[in-house]
Amino acid sequence: MGEITIVGLGPGSFGYITMETWDKITSAETLLLRTAKHPTVEEMQARGVQFNSYDYVYNTKDTFEEVYQTIANDCISRAQCGENIVYAVPGSPLVAEKTVVLIRELGKKLKVKVNILAGMSFIEVLYVRLGIDPIEGLTVIDSKDIERLVCSTENGIVITQVYNSQVASDTKLSLMEIYPDDFKVTLIQNLGLPNEKIIEIALYELDRQTGIDHLTSLYIPPYKQSQECFDLAPLTDVMARLRSPGGCVWDIEQTHRSLRRNLIEEVYEVVEAIDFENAELLCEELGDLLLQIVFHARMAEETGVFSMQDVIDGITEKLIRRHPHVFGDVTVRDAGEVVLNWEEIKRKEKAKERTHILDGVPKDLPSLMRAYKLQHKAAKVGFDWDNITPVWDKIEEEIKELKEAIALSDPKKVEEELGDVIFSIVNLSRFLKVDAEIALNSTNNKFVKRFSYIENKLKDKGKSWKGTALEELGKYWNEAKVTFLM
């Protein structure tokens, strides 16, 4: 069984190679380079160093992950066959070098000894050139892992291996989801070489630069972006603490069903804040509603059913699927066509679980809203009148049947017929393109205002409800109608 010794070729010119590394290179039985595209290689060749490189692998694989895994596998296989290998990588072995990570993992698993020599990375040179102190916080990430970049950007970020213009373009687009388009970043090319180039550019200009190659990196300075990004972690952490042993007894005892009413109430409080056009109140009520969502997600996570991240991922994927005109190649003419597309996509998604026309209308919706949705679904398949005239006739018919039920003094029949009347009124609202729920709620609010007016009048005059004639109450009611004009 052979051994693997991993060394670094430094960040640029030949002078950055350590003496220990040079001794290993010049005495190696087998010297393998991840890539010969490195500034030190020409000088190594001039000094008679013999080596093989893995550059050919880059041309045979589709992804960098496959390239790195192939290199790691080959190094381990050679060592298993008895070769003592010196494997050289650009920079330092333990700075942004995925093959080293893979070789170490495989070596540990297959009992192959792996030695790593300290080397100088481009980071040390970068500190000096940019005048930054890493103790203040610095994230180093490979361009291919850019999607893993988290929202927090209070530390500086170095993105390595910006290989070409396409990678630069992908990197730019990913960063522009977090940073302003014109945010100033620093482009670093050929660091530590005579033709070193370090320039500050606007982020949107990144892929317009010339000479982008394997020696190109990007530095992004710290960025305070409290308004551009948010983090659910504080809330989910608090909820986890409340539900944990030693937390809140009440919170621990709750179930999905016990919180059902709370969720409904919070939704209506959000709606009320919207009606009041009160931004501060709306912010507060949205927070209360979000708490309910996090609460339910936490309970589900405790039983392994799903997590808060599953909730977020699910709705994100759904939005992308149902907006093919934004995230795909579908073209739409107007908002109406967007709705049609949405409904068609939704119908296909729910085809297996919704086998009947009226499936999908929650039974616990407010009654007026549920009636509207049931009628709307039935109308989609042609179960509807062509115009409003029969709707009026149906209302008159239902009122007549209600009067007949009242005359018979049959409470159950009265309840049934009254429901039919209300259902018919909802149908009228649908033809008039008026939301019955909103209309009735508006009337409720109007009644509250007018009734409060009468109540205040009675207080001002020192009168009681029982001691005031209905005619006088009617007078105040008419005054309230004029006062509020609604």
Image (cartoon, rainbow, N blue to C red):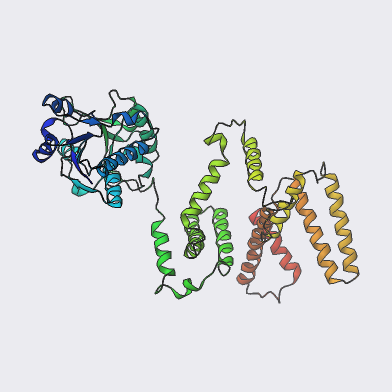
Q: Position of residue 266 (x, y in %)?
A: 55, 62
Q: Is residue 305 above or below residue 277?
A: below
Residue 42 lies in quadrant: top left
Asked whether, in this view, residue 315 is left or right of residue 216, the answer is right
Please tell me whether residue 53 is drawn above or below residue 354 in the rendered image: above
Q: Quadrant of residue 183?
A: top left
Q: Quadrant of residue 124?
A: top left
- Relative to the observer, which residue lies in front, 202 or 358? 358
Query: Residue at left 59%, top 66%?
Result: 261
- Residue 165 visible, this angle: yes
Q: What residue is rendered at 27% in x and 23% in y?
A: 211
Query: Horizontal placement of 103 versus 316: left or right?
Result: left
357 relative position to 134: left or right:
right
Q: Position of residue 323 (x, y in %)?
A: 56, 39
Can you say whether 91 is above or below 448 in the image? above
Where does residue 176 sit, x and y in percent of width and height? 38, 37
Q: Which residue corresponds to the image point at 35% horizontal and 41% vertical from the top-left? A: 145
Residue 138 sits above or below residue 422 on the image = above
Of 201 and 244, nearer the camera is 244
**Foreground: 56 or 352?**
56
Instruction: Where is residue 397? Give x, y as percent.
Output: 88, 55
User: Is residue 186 at all visible to an observer of this figure?
Assistant: no
